[in-house]
Image (spheres, grey):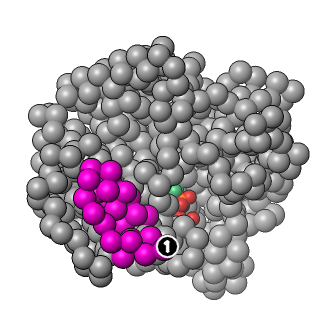
Amino acid sequence: MNARITLENTEELLQKHGQGHLLAFWGQLDAGQKQCLLSQIRSLDLPKIDQWVANYVKKAAPVEISHDFTAAESYRPHPIGAEQQSKYAKAVELGKELISAGKVGAFVVAGGQGTRLGFDGPKGNFPISPVKNRTFFQIFADSIAAVSQKYQTVCPWYIMTSRLNHGETVEILRSNGYYGLDEKSVFVFQQGTLPNFGPDGRILLADKANIARSPDGHGGSLKALHQSGALEDMKKRGVEYLSYFQVDNALINIFDPLFVGLHVLDNAEMSSKAVVKTGPQEKVGNFCLVDGKVTVIEYSDLPDELAEKRRSDGSLAFQLGSIAIHIISRSFVEKLNSKGFALPLHKAVKKIPHVDEQGNTVESDRIKLESFVFDALPLASNSMILQTLRNEEFAPTKNATGVDSVETTRQMMVARAADWLEWAGAAVPRKPDGSDCLLEIAPSFALEKEDLKEKLGDVPQIKPGDSIYLA
Ligand code: UTP
């Protein structure tokens, strides 16, 4: 039986771990606040926190690059040779079968803070599309509805939020009628949190009675899927694969039969899409093989001589950039959770509100720890990588302007629509630096360019300066 929790023994425990300051304002708290703070403190795994402080808070996580370290192999966007051609065809067929059978669910991680974008509210509610200002959530819901319609099935949608935006996200979905999807097929759940730290390793207080905490990173999704009951829900529905994507990628192709099919044909547990990097120092993670396991090494951790290394054909030796698109087998997440697992933590310095020693609320650079979902790749028995084309599938909206911004995303959405229409045979007015019109194709109109062929009759003549929404 647990020993009774008292102020005295809690104080003693905290002192032992250098966290005695958490009770600094005890005398100013009412009975309810005291109870609440005690239970927060008792839920901390202090020995584990000591390790985090030593390994991650007080120093940058050491980069251990093993001797057996090479670039990862991948499938090209298009097959090379007859054998691969037949494998791709088989994969597409299999992928379509699995999607039709309802075995693939959409999984968006939407628990981030989106501080760089500076938008008030969940990032998924940001109006991103170039003509109709449709939000990320609307675009994803439209795709899910269109795929469900195309394959005559129900594709469930799993949405991970965090304590910072859960209530608002649920309210946005509810007040928009789940964008026409069946509410019962939309599963919204919260990720976990981790305490915030000062540079000296002391846990921060958000106010006198509460520990300061931040979402535990997108890697937290692998535990949250289990803890929230989402895995159980998948099992009940017969969903075996999750199509994982980020909330700020409006170009995502959520249900890609080729990607799903190759994942299954290769017996992979977790697969990834990659793009060829724009240059040696592009700020994306690098797909590598470490001790034979697919591993993403962050751009800042890849030694310059490896980042710059070229093959005899001039291409970068480490050319595959990670774009946070994965297929994850349910059985893999179940396996991880049943045997217990811990992803490494990464330290980020952010502006974090907290109380100082005098009890004043201040906001300054402090430390949050998070885990990254790609750190689960080496835990998979098999892992497959499929290259894709950046202009087709990857438009990260991180900032309001400049690089990876609202601006560049809208340009990419218009550019992809123009490319698809021209490919299908429509005339698109052009300027030297792109199309001379605004274009938006709703997923209900075309999920992929092939869908446009039979819809050309519904495409109006596009004149310079036009703003056209095809739905
Ligand atoms: P980012 O790394 O872009 O972080 O997240 P962010 O918090 O959204 O944005 P900044 O850095 O504050 O500007 C990439 C994806 O991972 C999700 C985000 O919602 C986004 O889809 N994410 C990130 C989570 O779901 N939980 C987290 O704890 C962190």
Mark 1 Cα shell of 10 Å, populated few (<14), some (14-19), many (≥20): few
Horizontal relation, residue 8 to residue 113: left or right? right
Q: Please tell me whether mark 1 sits on a helix, a strand or a loop.
A: loop
Q: How many marks on residues?
A: 1
Horizontal relation, residue 122 to residue 181: left or right? right
Instruction: Tell me which segment is drawn in magenta.
Output: 412-436
Above or below: residue 231 compared with residue 181: above
Please name the residue shown 11% across and 34% down the image.
152
362, 209: nearer the viewer: 362
Residue, disc 1:
433
Give the residue type that dot 1 points to: Asp
**In x, y percent, where is residue 273?**
51, 39
Above or below: residue 84 compared with residue 104: above
431, 253: nearer the viewer: 431
**In x, y percent, where is residue 364?**
68, 79
**Mark 1: is the Cβ under 8 angstroms from ligand 1?**
no
Q: Is residue 179 visible?
A: yes
Above or below: residue 308 compared with residue 381: below
Horizontal relation, residue 382 to residue 282: left or right? left
Choose top left, top right, bottom left or bottom right for residue 258. Answer: top left
Is 424 inside the magenta-drawn segment?
Answer: yes
Choose top left, top right, bottom left or bottom right for residue 466. Answer: bottom left
Q: Is residue 51 visible?
A: no
Please name the residue shown 39% across and 50% down the image.
252
Horizontal relation, residue 368 to residue 181: left or right? right
Residue at the extreme top: 83
**In x, y percent, where is residue 128?**
35, 70
Please name the residue shown 26% across and 53% down the image.
425
